[in-house]
Structure formats: structure tokens, C-alpha cells
Amino acid sequence: MKRFAFVGVGMVAGFSAALMLFPAAHGANDSAYKQLDLFSDAFERVRADYVHPVEDGQLVTSAIEGMVSGLDPHSSYMDAKAFADMKIQTKGQFGGLGIEVTMEDGLVKVISPIDDTPAARAGIKPGDYIAAIDSTPIQGMSLNDAIEKMRGPEGSKISLTILRSGAKKPFDVALTRAIVQVDSVKFHREGDIGYIRLSAFNEATAPGLERAVRDLKRQIGPGLKGYVLDLRNNPGGLLDQAIQVSDDFLNSGEIVSTRGRHSDDTARYDAKAGDIGDGKPIIVLVNAGTASASEIVAGALQDHKRATIEGMTSFGKGSVQTIIPLGEGGGALRLTTARYYTPSGHSIQATGIVPDVAVAEGDEDETAARLEHLSEANLPGHLNGEGGAKKTAPQIIHPPAGKKIEDFQLSYALDLLRGKLAMSASNKSAAAN
């Protein structure tokens, strides 16, 4: 039986990402099975005495969901249909809204909308809470049930009731479901600088990045000063793609390691020779919506001093979920089995990647309110990080007062690469830690 491991955040309304293979499950402690007598008693009482008959399969499914979802925010049970959908979704095309979500305080919380999807076009933002779907309250639903309600045929309509920090009252957002094609790599030239946006890590991400670098070299020529790699609001995805993207800019050394309860869950991934960026300077943009596989890339390039990390502290999702099939037609467990670590041995679980240069987004008041609680550390039941002291965040650079800049973080990165700005003493100190 194969077990597939994941480093995506939460669940996605129509999106998940498989990562790597682990061997079969470890033997369980036989004494634990004695506790199953209690479950058997409860199961029989519900079957016999509940107000109306309930199918045995429904009772077992609910029991498994409750057991697994109580462990941490990222462990869950997928029934056979959800498991089949997940295996299709890693190809980079799926039906739904294109929104990465988790469950918090009984509501669905948005980690990040995916670029150019119905959710992104409708203005859904990181940190939003979904309180109702088509006027049906979320309270009392499981995360899987809520995601299932958000799925539907292409072209069908759906209404989400949104709670947003700073908004005086809930408001409804109308969306049209679509077949979402995740074009995970977009790029263009910013004069003498190559801009590359990675919105997710699916099977096309590393090849897309390599094609983008080739095209930018051809477009810009020998005057190319460097690259901006934009990982803002990238919720993660395939681990092998995060490793390959990191490897593309590194010549040697560790990229990431995973450490779990058992030796089988421990692994180290190293870079091979060959830097497609030819050593040109790189600035990686991150924010609170940068999570999981994205944090692997940012952490690897930061620890090897291959890139300067700019923006705001990332989400802090540093755990690996293994997909464990449960017999024929029984669905699968999505179970947290390991933490992952940057090359310096730093666990970013519940701490995130701290930028070398802390630069605020343009609309600071609205952004601060929206992202105040958007982090792994604020999810109920989250795992604690292990290994390495938390870095001190440098002083935040804010947009100049009275001056409207559409994307201040990108503008600042371009100025840094062109030598128009220098890191402050506090930023240099933080980068050296």
C-alpha cells in the first residue's frame, strides 16, 4: 500500500497536492485496541437507540473524521470520492473556486485564493472567514463537508457569506464555479529585471520556472540584473516541485529535511550542481499567505544566502501530511507524520520564514487587520516548532506617506536589485542571523 505525503496548507475547495512516498504504516500497540471496546459499545447504542436509523457507514465515517480532525489542523479523513478528486487535482486542473482553506473556530478560514480563479476574481482575501454557503451556515459542518458544498458543475452559481476583519458586518460574495487551470508560473520583464510569479506548486511548476528563466534571459540579454521570485499568497503544493525549484538556483547543499516519529519519516534532500540563474541576485517576496512548499523554497535560498527574502513573515506551516489509503473503496487518511526543516536546522512550524528585509504591503491598515491572525500559530491545535531559535524580525519598512504605490513590496525589490536602495543596519543584522 502506498502512502503519499503532502506539505500543502489545510484543504482547498477543489485543490490538494501530493508530495512524496513513504513506506507502509508502522505496527500499532496491541493494548490500544482494548479501547475499541468503548467505541463498539457506543456504536451499538447509537445504532439501536438513535431517534432514527443511521447507516453503519455514516457512523464509521463520522467516527474517523472526529478522530483524525482532533489531532491538528491539517490531519483529516477523505472518503473515496474526495480521495479520487485529490489524485486528479495534483495535475494542476480541477473544478471549484480555487481557494485554499482551513477550519478555525467552527468557520472556514481562507489561507489564500489562487491566482486567476473565481475566488481571486471575486475579491476573496487571505484571512477572510466563510460563515455560510448559499445561506447555509458553516457552523457544525466538517471541513470536508464545507468544501464539498463549494464544489459543483462548471458555470453554476454559489454565494459565500464573508466575515472580514475591519468590515462592519458580514457580506455576500457571488461566484461562478469554473474548471480551474492553475497556471502556476507567470513572468515578464521589469526593464532589466526578470519577474517570476509562482502561485502554486503543481506538476508544471519547475518546468515552467525553467522556461521563464530561459525566456527572460533571451528577452533582457546580457544587461539582466537579477530576478524577483514572487511567492506571496502561494499556499504550497508538491514537495518534489519545491525541491526542484530550490535546486534550480543552488549548486550544492541541503534543500530541506523531514523528521518524523519514525526513521522511515526522516529524509534529506540535497541540491545538484547547476544554477539556472547564473548567480544573478534574487529577491524572494513572501507574506502571511506564503505557506508550506513555498516556505521550503524561501528557507533554502535564504539559508544558503542565494536570495534576499523580502516582505512579511510567512504562514509557518512546517508539517508533512501523508496520504494513507484505507483499503479498497475506504478513502484515505491525510495524517501529519513529520516536520520539515530548513538547511540550518530551523523548523518553520508555527514560526514561519522571517524576511531579511521586512516591507509592508501598500494598504497597511487594512492589510494589518486582515492578516493579524493569519498564521499557523493561530490555528487551534497546531503543532509546535522544534529546532533552532526564532529569528528576530527586522524593522518594518512602510510605504512613503502620501504616495500611492500599486505594489510597494515589488517596487522596493526592484529598487534593491538596481542598487537604488541599501538594507538598513537592522535589516543587515537580521539577515546575518
Image (spheres, rainbow, N blue to C red):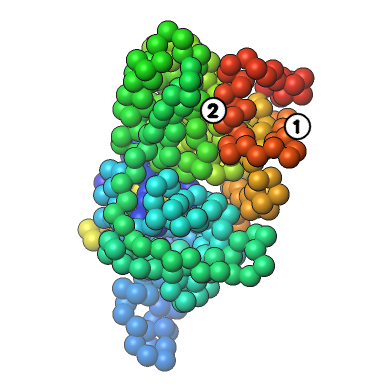
Rendered location of residue 294, percent (x, y): 48, 35
Q: In which image quadrant can residue 391 be found?
A: top right
Kindly give the residue lying farthest to the top in the view shown. Answer: 222
Callout 1, which amino acid? Answer: Gln
Q: Earlier in the sequence, mark 2 or mark 1?
A: 2
Q: Is residue 332 left or right of residue 195?
A: left
Return the residue nearer the eye: 429 or 96.
96
Number of callouts: 2
Which residue position holds label 2?
284
Which residue is located at x 59 percent, y 43 percent?
A: 288
Q: Is residue 81 left or right of residue 394?
A: left
Return the residue nearer the eye: 51 or 206.
206
Q: In which image quadrant can residue 82 be found?
A: bottom left
Which residue is located at x 42 percent, y 88 percent?
A: 50
Return the residue nearer the eye: 341 or 151.
151
Which residue is located at x 43 percent, y 78 percent?
A: 41
Kindly give the residue lying farthest to the left in the view shown. Answer: 328
Rendered location of residue 374, percent (x, y): 61, 50
Callout 2, which amino acid? Answer: Val
Dot 1 alpha-carbon crowd within 10 angstroms: few under 14, some 14 to 19, many 20 or more: some
Q: In which image quadrant can residue 104 be found?
A: bottom right
Which residue position holds label 1?
395
